[in-house]
């Protein structure tokens, strides 16, 4: 529609120019000469200027830029969507774990049970207790320990009673080795008339009177024994 109106405007302008050119081209009439008597007058042809037709300019239609439109898919045609490349996430490398060396537990030796002490001594009826002491002598294999009851009493600061009234109580316990496996101790009492075996074993209790006591280690091991003793006197 706009193109048709523009072409009409241009044509009207062209006709107006053409009309103006025709009006201005007609000049004034040239006066004719008066012929002289006797002369022949040759009529002069007057050139009539033909109006020059103005060239009608050809109008080129102005090209209107059409908006670029997205191609409309045809009915029945399948539009294939363009696949967009998706970057796959790079899998993180799992670090390899080095095996951890497990420290082997250091074996702790099982502590040996502590050996008990020699048992307390119970004095029999009719006996007065004068004093008590303790010995821990070592005994070598097949060794012998001699004990004098009178010297034991004197070591406690006791005046020994008469031999007929003198009483000695003993209790013992092997403390090394412990447990006292395969330990064999023997207690002998020597007096006027002979020697008597009072007791044997790694622990025990005996009583005697005047005379002497022999402790014999019949085992093949070094022995440490605790001996408890009580000096007593028979009551009158």
Image (cartoon, helix red, strand yellow):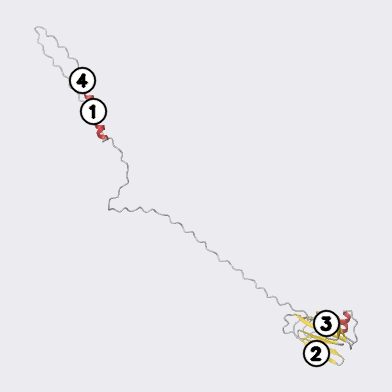
Q: Residue at x 23, y 25 (%)?
A: 16
- Mark whose residue sits in front, 4 or 3: 3
Of 30 and 230, the residue lying toward us? 230
Mark 2 falls on what kind of element? Answer: strand
Residue 188 visible in the current orientation: yes
Q: Which mark is residue 12?
A: 1
Nearer-N-terminus badge (4/3): 4
- Mark whose residue sits in front, 1 or 2: 1
What is the quadrant of residue 116 in the picture? bottom right
User: CA–CA distance between discs 3 and 2?
Assistant: 18 Å
User: CA–CA distance between discs 1 and 3?
Assistant: 160 Å
For the N terminus, the image quarter is: top left
Q: Residue furthest bottom?
A: 193
Nearer-N-terminus badge (1/4): 1
User: CA–CA distance between discs 1 and 4?
Assistant: 17 Å
Q: Which mark is residue 229?
A: 3
Q: Which residue is mark 4?
A: 23
Q: Residues within 10 Å of mark 4 (few under 14, many from 20)?
A: few
User: CA–CA distance between discs 2 and 4?
Assistant: 183 Å
User: CA–CA distance between discs 1 and 2?
Assistant: 168 Å
| Count of residue discs | 4
- Mark whose residue sits in front, 1 or 4: 1
Residue 59 visible in the current orientation: no
Nearer-N-terminus badge (2/4): 4
Tag 1 near tag 2, CB within 8 Å: no
Measured as percent of width and height from the top left, residue 169 is found at 83, 84
Q: Which mark is residue 197?
A: 2
Measured as percent of width and height from the top left, residue 132 is found at 84, 80
Mark 3 falls on what kind of element? Answer: strand
Measured as percent of width and height from the top left, residue 72 is found at 30, 48
Q: Residue at x 83, y 82 (%)?
A: 229
């Amino acid at each position: 529609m706009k193109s048709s109106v523009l072409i009409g405007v241009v044509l009207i302008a062209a006709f107006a120019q053409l009309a103006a050119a025709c009006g201005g081209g007609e000049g004034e009439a040239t006066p004719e000469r008066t012929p002289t008597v006797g002369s022949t007058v040759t009529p002069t042809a007057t050139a009539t200027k033909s109006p020059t037709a103005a060239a009608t300019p050809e109008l080129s239609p102005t090209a209107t830029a059409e908006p670029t439109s997205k191609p409309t898919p045809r009915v029945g045609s399948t539009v294939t969507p363009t696949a967009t490349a998706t970057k796959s996430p790079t899998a993180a490398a799992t670090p390899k774990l080095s095996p951890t060396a497990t420290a082997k537990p250091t074996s702790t030796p099982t502590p040996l049970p502590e050996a008990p002490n020699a048992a307390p001594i119970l004095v029999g009826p009719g006996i007065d207790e004068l004093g008590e002491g303790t010995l821990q002598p070592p005994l070598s294999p097949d060794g012998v320990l001699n004990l004098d009851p009178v010297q034991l009493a004197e070591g406690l600061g006791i005046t020994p009673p008469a031999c007929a009234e003198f009483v000695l109580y003993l209790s013992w316990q092997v403390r090394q080795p412990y447990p006292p496996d395969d330990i064999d101790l023997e207690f002998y009492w020597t007096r006027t008339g002979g020697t008597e075996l009072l007791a044997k074993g790694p622990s025990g209790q005996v009583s005697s009177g005047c005379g002497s006591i022999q402790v014999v280690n019949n085992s093949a091991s070094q022995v440490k024994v605790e001996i408890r003793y009580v000096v007593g006197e028979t009551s009158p």
